[in-house]
Amino acid sequence: MATGAIYLALLLCGVLFFALHYLALSRLARRLREHHPDQWKIIAQDDRGLAVSTTARWMRLQNALRSPVLPALQDATLNRWRTLWRLFPLLAWGCLIAAFALRWAFR
């Protein structure tokens, strides 16, 4: 019974960390839009100044978050959300792998 509760808790924590990953992404985008509009324009507009599609904007934001450009802005809040954005998937996968290992061990 206790292993079942631990298993479910690990699964829920994994899902929660994935949800927090997307929350961090939305907070990063919002911070960029509000406090760094020139950098947001690079993500949200193409070379002609037209808005890009949602998918293209998401891909451009992912590339910007992986680049060294955002830490160069020296925005502590942006850097904190970026760190959390990078950390949450690792925690989520750790919880899910631990849950699957627990299930495999007690099969």
Image (tube, rainbow, N blue to C red):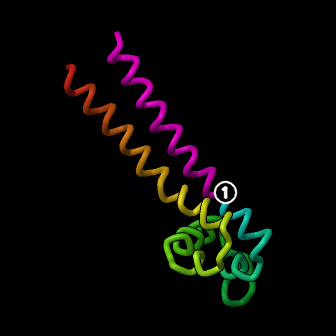
Q: Pick out the residue farthest to the bottom.
A: 48
Name the magenta segment's main secondary structure: helix
At 48% across and 30% down in the image, what residue appears?
12
Q: In the image, is residue 41 above or below residue 92? A: below
Picture coordinates of residue 87, whole percent (x, y): 47, 54
Picture coordinates of residue 94, whole percent (x, y): 36, 43
Q: Pick out the residue farthest to the top.
A: 1
Q: In the image, is residue 18 above or below residue 42? A: above
At 38% across and 38% down in the image, what residue appears?
95
Q: In the image, what residue type sits under mark 1?
A: Ser
- The total of numbered circles placed on residues is 1
The segment highlighted magenta reads: 1-26
Quadrant of the drawing holding the C terminus: top left
Which quarter of the figure has residue 53? bottom right
Q: Secondary structure at mark 1?
A: helix
Which quarter of the figure has residue 4? top left
Which quarter of the figure has residue 78? bottom right
Q: Specify whether 96 is left or right of 35.
A: left
Residue under numbered circle 1: 26
Residue 62 lies in magenta, yes or no? no
48 or 66, nearer to the observer: 66
Residue 25 lies in magenta, yes or no? yes
At 69% across and 75% down in the image, what residue appears?
44
Picture coordinates of residue 70, whole percent (x, y): 60, 76
Picture coordinates of residue 72, whole percent (x, y): 60, 81
